[in-house]
Structure formats: structure tokens, C-alpha cells
Image: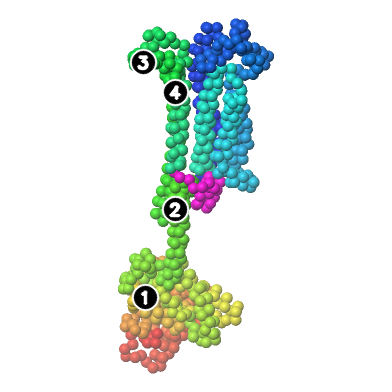
Amino acid sequence: MRKKVPRFYGLRIYILTTILYFFLVFPFLMIASMKYLPQVLDEDQNGFSLNPETQMQNKQPFVPDTMGAGPSMNDSTAMTKDTSRGLITLSRDGKESTTVGGEEKLTSSVTAVFRALLVSYLLGLFFNFPFKRYFKLNRKGKQIPKRLYKFVKKWLLSVPIVNALIFGGGLLFSLAYIFYYLQFTTFEDEINHSIFLQYFYISIIASILAFLLIYFWERHRVHLKYIEHVFSLEELKVRVFKSRKGKIGNRLLISSLMTSLLPLTIVMLYLFLSVTQIKDLDVDYTDPKQIEILFGTESSFFDDADNFSYEEIAKHAFVIYVNAWNSMFMFIGIFTGIFIAFIYLLLFVRWMTADIVRPVNELLAHMERTGQEHVNEFAIVRTNDEIGVLGEGYNFMTRRINQYIQNISKLNETYFRFVPEQFLKILGKKSIEEISHGDQIEKEMTVLFTDIRSFTEISEEMTPKENFDFINMYLAYMEPVIGRNNGFIDKFMGDSIMALFPYDVEDAINAAIEMRIKLAEFNQVITQFGKKPINSGIGIHTGSLMLGIVGGENRLDGTVISDAVNLASRLEGLTKIYGGSIIISEDSLTKIQGSENYEYRFLDVVKVKGKKKAVYIFEVLNGEDERCRELKKSTKYEFGRAADMYQNKEFTKALGKFKNIYEQNPSDKAAVFYIERCKRFIKDGLPEDWDGIEKLSKI
């Protein structure tokens, strides 16, 4: 199943980060302006104004107070204004200086921020466009240009830092702009300078938060969303990151800074901005009521002080005064900081959880599948920290396990070429390691024996190497046939094969028929190399046998021991006498489920060497070539009648019928064999103990 391709986020991250940045900065402007509003109004009521127009109308020169508490009169200083440029020119002792209005500076600074961010947006769009196009084409299943793929693969891991630098570069430019005003321009009063300085501090913290937010947001998406759609699974088995090894502890530390320390710094700044020092107030320090309001219950502490007055204490000590406006905007600042901290907390908790939990869950899932014998499972290494090292180690371990299992499998396959897998299954063993001396089981099976006829004469015409190559070539044709028919080879004995079929007799008969077909193909090949064609005989018998492990301490072998094995071997030998290609016993014939699928005929009742009990044998005609098979089928009924006459001692009648069969099919060696016996009995008479059973002591 194809994994869903995600969308590439670039512009939307910029926009959301910008909103959070201005959410941190704008409340400050309102707090700062409202903080100094009472002082400005008080100065206006006393004939002093920060407005140059008012100063000119009152013809009172504007001079900042050395204590920063407001303007004062000085005969050596005069002030004029150039309204066409919005500049205020102060003349002091014949010298002139130019200052810019605070409102104009603030407006200019905010405008610079917007312009810098606009440039950042354009650069971000330019850089992120190839990635957005790549994922869009990938999501729609369209072909991806080679150059685009190379670019995305080369720069994907750098997306977080590049985007952070692009956005942070714009903010850095705005900070430099504000810093320039602070260092290289003159403010018209201490209030505007203080506001600008505090605005600069707030902007620094907000810029740091914005820079880190973009970096970690993009990093989160690259590691968990994008990486597997650009790099191949083979590449992601190890860490593809170019940066040095990371640590989870460092990520947690950065997360803590982003979600607590920096937002709390904003809160502290707002707390600082929300208070006013008593020394900046125009207070009557001789009025007990005002003193009690300002200093509270602690005012009595200074009653007996001879060397210090309340005015001196307020002037030199950091004693603050909190009013309703300050309290209100203090809460606004605290709310702003807490709100930002809450947003960052949600984002970073989510990212940190996903960055840690998802790779771990993927790793656990792969481990579980590996435990279920899915040895080709590999985890995607998404991070460069300890989890990445763990994933990389798991992949290395899985690769080694996979290689080990492959080696074991190859070794088992090699073992199975010596000890068949079916042999182990019958013994109830899963691997050859479980085999021990004396393991055995009794089971009814069908035994197949096959042998090349007159191979001794054939081998005399070949060198030992040619003999070896000839046998291997022949066995290469025969061995697969047995496996295809649910059997397995117990052993090779020169040019002979002994195979076992543990399930159905039909498997053995089908294998015998197919082996005869393969023999014809083999003969076609060897005749092309000047070799004479060969023939083979196959004997099949079904019976109970003992299958097990025999041998000594240092040498074991799997084998089958049973009278059924010996009989199958004897039946194969009878094919030379009766001229049949496949001879089966009555025990095998009676166990055939679909006997109508085979053509067969009764041959004889015999006693083979080493057997006291007579065996009814039958010839399977399906293994003969087409012409011989049709001739034997046409004489099958007559052959059966002749065999019955023979068993009933009607040798003269039987002889006539067998001769008739021979005339129709001179290649019927079984008819020839009966003809010779009938003639012998007619001539010499029957033995006294004759019971119709042919005793074949040499077979």
C-alpha cells in the first residue's frame, strides 16, 4: 500500500510565526505609551509639552531634564522646528543638533520590520517552491524531473536551517535598524529613548522565539513527514543526516527553553515595564497622606531617620509605585507571555512526543514483526539522536540476522540435499540439528525403485569421468520428477534410485510415468552426442516400513528398513523378465483411489528371492511408448484369458492364445515368457508341487 504523500509547508509556517511574533511585540507599545501618559499630561498642565508646536507657541525652549523627569527652562538653550522635514533643532551655546520625533522613529521601525519580512517571504517562496512542486507531483503520482529530484534530495535536510535563516534574517535586519536609531540618532526626550530601548529588547526575544519556532517546526516535518518520500528505504536504514550526532537531552533542554524560559522572560519584561519608580513622580514628601499611600505601613520605619528623608530614599533607592493603569497592563503583558508559552508548549510537546514516540513505536512494530519471522523488516532512521542510533543499530542487527538466517537456510538446503526435508518431517523434526541416533518411526509408504537396464555394458564403453557425468546427467532428469509428485529420494545407488512416497500410491505411479517421459527426452539428448539410448525399469510396492537414523557415533545416515523395500527392488528386477517398464504389486494396486486413470494388466503370481509369500504383480501400461501401449491394450483381455488358462493348467489353450498375442505384438516379452513356460510344461510335465506360482530365485 502506497503511503500518503504529505503537503509541503513553507508559507503557512512563515505566516503563523509572523502572527506570534507581532503578538509578542504589539502589546508592549500600548503598555509603554499608557505608562508615560500621566507624566506627559502633567507636563502639559505645567506649561511644558513634548509637542514642538506647543513649545513654539509658549516660546519656551525645550530642554530634557538631567534626571529624565521632564523638560525645564534654561537661558542658554533655544529650540526651533523645521516643520517641512518634521525635525526639531536644538541650539545650545551656539551648537545645533538634529533629532527625529519618537513617533516617526517607531513608525519607521515597524515599517522596516514589514519590509524585511516581505523580503523574507519572497526568498522563502523561491527556496521552498521546488519542494512544494516535488511533493505535489509525487502526491498526484506524476513523473518527477531528474533535476528536481536531485535538488530536493540534496537540500531537504537543510530546509529547517535555511528557512529559519531566511525568516530570521529579516528579523535581524529590523533589529539592526532599531539598534541604529538607538546608537546613532538623538531622541527628543528620555521617554521615547526608553520606549525604543525596551522595544528593542522585546524584539530580540520575539525574534529568537520566531527563529527557533520555524527551525523546529520545519525539522519536525522533515524528519516525520518528508524524509521517507525523498530517500529510499535502503538509504534510511542508517542516518542520512550530515550534522554531528544529536542528543535527546539537548532537544529536551531546547524545548524547555522554548516553552518556559523565553516566554517567561517576556513576562518579566512586561512586569518590569508595568511599574513606575517613585522618584519619577512629582510627590509632596511632606504630606503624610501621600507618604502613607506611597510607602504603606513601612512609612513609619523612616520616621526616626535623621539623615534620610523620603525624598532622598525615593531618589536613590529602587522604590516602585504601582497604579491602576500599571496593574491592568501588567496583567495584559503576563497574559501575553503565558499565552505564547501555552502555544509553544502545545507545539513543542506535540513535536517532541511525535519525534520520540513515533520512531520508537515504529521500531517496536518492526521488532514485533521480526519476532514473527519477518526478517526483512527495517526501521526508518528519522533522527540523529539516541533514537536514531537505536534504529540504526536495529537495522544493523536485522541485517545480520537476515544474513544469518540466509546462511542457515542455505546450509539447511544443503543438508536437505543429503537428508531430505520430508524425511525430517516424517520423523517429527524441524531441523537436522534435532536428529539423534536411533530416531525412528513406523509408517506405511510406497517405495519406488528404478534402475538403468544393462548399465554395466554401457559403462564399459566410457571412462570413469564419463560414467560419472553420464549418471549425474541422468539423475538430473529424474530427481525433480520425484519432488514434483510429493516424494523424496532416500538414496542413490549408482545408476539406481530409491524413492519414498509417504502420502498416496498415485504419487508414485505418476512419478514413474513422468520418469518414463523424461527418459525419452534424455535419450534424444544423448543420441545427439553419439550415445546409445538407454532403458529403465521401475518397481513399486506399498507397505509398512521403519524410517529412521542408523549409524555410529561419528557417522549417521537416514534410511528405511522393511521387507517392503526389498520387494520393491525385486519388482524392478522383474521388469527385465516380463519386459514391462513399470511393475506394481497387488498391495499398491488395491490402494489406488482412481484406478480408471491408469491402464494396467495382470502379469503373474510370483515368489521372488527372499520372499515366502506369493505376490500378484501388474504392469502399468501408461509408461510404455504409444505404439507398444496401444498393442498391449488391444490384447489385454486375451492376455488375461490366457493367464487364467495357464493357472488352470490348460497349457495347450493358453499356448495358442499367447502365440496369437505374440503375433500381434512381437515386443510383448511377457507373452514370450509364458510361451516358453507352456512349452516346457507340455513337454516335461508339471512338477508335483506346482501351484501356479512362478518361483524366481535369481530375482
Local packing at callout 3 (Cα closer than 10 Å; few below 14, some 14-19, many 20+) is few
Q: Nearer the viewer, mark 4 or mark 2?
A: 4
Whether residue 337 is situated above or below residue 495 in the rendered picture: above
> In this rendering, would 251 be left or right of 426?
right
On the image, the x and y values in percent for residue 243 come to 53, 46
Identify the residue shown where x is 33% and y is 76%: 553
- Location of mark 2 (residue): 394
Q: Nearer the viewer, mark 4 or mark 3?
A: 3
Residue 175 counted in the magenta span: no
Query: Which stretch is magenta?
Result: 227-248
Local packing at callout 2 (Cα closer than 10 Å; few below 14, some 14-19, many 20+) is many
In three-dimensional space, the C-alpha distance between marks 4 and 3, rounded to whole angstroms, equals 31 Å
Q: How many marks?
A: 4
On the image, the x and y values in percent for residue 64 come to 56, 15
On the image, the x and y values in percent for residue 650 come to 38, 85
Which sits earlier in the primary sequence, circle 4 or circle 2?
A: 4
Q: Nearer the viewer, mark 1 or mark 2?
A: 2
Which sits earlier in the primary sequence, circle 1 or circle 3?
A: 3
In three-dimensional space, the C-alpha distance between marks 1 and 2, rounded to whole angstroms, equals 40 Å
Residue 556, numbered label: 1
**Front-most of 18 and 102?**
102
Which sits earlier in the primary sequence, circle 2 or circle 3?
A: 3
On the image, the x and y values in percent for residue 423 come to 38, 69
In three-dimensional space, the C-alpha distance between marks 4 and 1, rounded to whole angstroms, equals 90 Å
